[in-house]
Image (cartoon, helix red, strand yellow):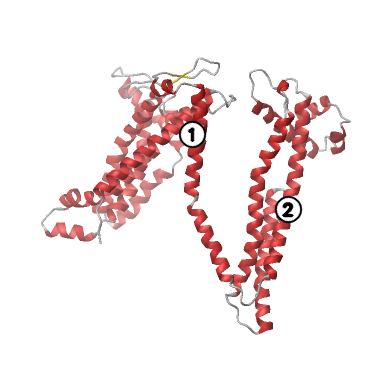
């Protein structure tokens, strides 16, 4: 039974529990002549909660633990002798999963019977042929141990899925009956229902904390593994980025940091002044009709996919800058450049600056404007000397959001700035960023335990620390210049 069917069955039992619980509470109240402590719906909600919550918790726990248990069992079945020289055990286990999936496909097509697979009456060459017919191509000789592990893996997954379905549905049914039998007229069903809602709110509020802890933990552990293989001093201070998956790699982060900061600064130079001027005009000068049209039109820029911006940079902006600026002045011959990616990225993040700054400027109390006008200040003087200083903390937050968006962008850089990791001041030269190299190091059929792959986690952790530093700086600025109003 698939997970979707299990969820559907539990959902049906939950709905049934709600209606039966509500009806049972009304029936008991009518028979005893006693008034219910809570509204009838709360009694139904109590039965529904006890029916669904334990069952879904068991389902989630089972889906998390079962792969770990099965992989551990399969790992013990694979001897070191079947692992290719220079290969990784994880790749062999991946082959086991692939073969197991192919066996399911062969059985579902009727090409092979379950009994023939179980009793070993069919030879491996025949099974190999049938796996190829369903799209599972096996390169080279597959050891018998790997094939046997695939059969065990398939049987374990199948048995686990059956046990999971039985236990989850039984738990839902059992707790539902137990909650149904607990219903009494004086039962405080509302407290049970509201207590669940409170617990749900508390759990939701911890999602961000747990997510951050998980991200940092995954980055830190893999980064530690990387620095066990590659010197940290060369990573942080080397000016050469030259990964070679066969050894002799030079993995210096400085060219990547330079490209990231260079592209981001160009993008902010474009986005911040334009976005801020748009916000000031919409908030202080534009009429309601123009504002109602202009603001949604500008915010549409934020909804355009980044791949579209990348194609725009590749096809239009890059060739334009190359033909009319770079080549005539002898600054370069490539359409991929820092300036190309920076300009297009700046256009992309304009709505982040303009929309947020507009909302922040509108939040400044009207009394400040009236007081400035009463003292004889003009509108422009009021904007410069009163409104912008009052809205500065919020504007800094908007700029920070735009900077974070620029630092984390990948597609525009890939198509607009290229993939060359180098230190150069020429904005018409092709460069790359940290995010692009994270993707490239984790893409392809590479060994995960190699330093050339693990370096992606070190790059990610470095980028995380830089972003955290920007947040701390912005928080300092906000606290220093914060204005409080009554």
Q: Which residue is mark 1?
A: 220
As displayed, is residue 42 above or below residue 167?
below
Q: Residue at x 56, y 62 (%)?
A: 196
Callout 2 secondary element: helix
Mark pair 2, 1: CA separation: 37 Å
- The answer to whether residue 443 is left or right of residue 357 is right
**Image location of residue 364, percent across then percent down:** 26, 56
Residue 28 in the image, given as x and y percentages of width and height: 68, 79
Q: Nearer the viewer, residue 324 or 353?
A: 353
Q: Residue at x 73, y 51 (%)?
A: 165
Question: Residue lying farthest left?
Answer: 376
Q: Nearer the viewer, residue 152 or 279?
A: 152
Number of on-image labels: 2
Q: Is residue 420 left or right of residue 38?
A: left
Residue 370 % position (x, y): 18, 60
Task: For label 2, count other residues whose C-alpha is less than 10 Å away and answer few (under 14), some (14-19) or many (20+).
Answer: some
């Amino acid at each position: 039974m698939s997970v979707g069917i299990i969820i559907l069955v539990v959902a049906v039992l939950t709905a049934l529990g709600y209606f039966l619980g509500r009806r049972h509470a009304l029936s008991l109240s009518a028979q005893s002549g006693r008034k219910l402590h809570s509204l009838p719906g709360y009694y139904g909600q109590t039965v529904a909660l006890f029916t669904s919550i334990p069952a879904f918790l068991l389902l989630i726990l089972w889906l998390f633990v079962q792969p770990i248990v099965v992989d551990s069992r399969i790992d013990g079945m694979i001897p070191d002798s079947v692992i290719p020289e220079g290969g990784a055990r994880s790749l062999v286990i991946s082959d086991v999963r692939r073969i197991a999936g192919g066996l399911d496909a062969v059985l579902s097509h009727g090409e092979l019977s379950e009994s023939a697979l179980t009793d070993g009456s069919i030879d491996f060459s025949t099974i190999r042929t049938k796996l190829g017919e369903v799209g599972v191509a096996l390169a080279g000789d597959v050891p018998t141990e790997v094939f046997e592990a695939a059969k065990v893996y398939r049987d374990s997954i199948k048995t686990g899925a059956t046990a999971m379905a039985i236990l989850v549905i039984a738990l839902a049914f059992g707790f539902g009956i137990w909650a149904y039998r607990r219903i009494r007229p004086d039962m405080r069903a509302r407290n049970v229902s509201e207590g669940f809602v409170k617990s749900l709110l508390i759990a939701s509020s911890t999602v961000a904390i747990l997510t951050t802890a998980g991200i940092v933990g995954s980055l830190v552990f893999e980064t530690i593994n990387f620095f066990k293989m590659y010197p940290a001093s060369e990573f942080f201070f080397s000016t050469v980025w030259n990964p070679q998956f066969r050894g002799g790699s030079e993995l210096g982060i400085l060219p990547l940091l330079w490209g990231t900061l260079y592209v981001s600064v160009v993008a902010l130079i474009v986005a911040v002044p334009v976005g801020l001027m748009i916000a000031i005009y919409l908030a202080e000068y534009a009429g309601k009709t123009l504002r109602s049209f202009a603001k949604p039109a500008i915010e549409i820029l934020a909804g355009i996919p980044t791949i579209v911006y990348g194609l725009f940079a590749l096809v239009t902006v890059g060739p334009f800058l190359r033909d009319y600026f770079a080549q005539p002045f002898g600054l370069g011959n490539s359409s991929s450049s820092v300036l190309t990616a920076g300009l297009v990225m700046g256009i992309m993040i304009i709505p982040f600056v303009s929309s947020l700054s507009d909302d922040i400027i509108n939040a400044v109390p009207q009394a400040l404007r009236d007081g400035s006008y009463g003292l004889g200040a003009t509108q422009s003087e009021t904007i410069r000397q009163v409104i912008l200083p009052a809205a500065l903390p919020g504007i800094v937050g908007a700029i920070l959001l735009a900077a974070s968006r620029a630092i984390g962008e990948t597609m525009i850089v890939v198509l607009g700035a290229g993939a060359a990791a180098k230190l150069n001041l020429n904005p018409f030269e092709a460069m790359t960023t940290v995010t692009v190299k994270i993707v490239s190091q984790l893409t392809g059929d590479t060994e995960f335990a190699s330093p050339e792959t693990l370096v992606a986690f070190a790059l990610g952790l470095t980028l995380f620390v830089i972003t955290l530093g920007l947040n701390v700086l912005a928080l300092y600025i906000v606290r220093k210049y914060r204005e409080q109003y009554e």
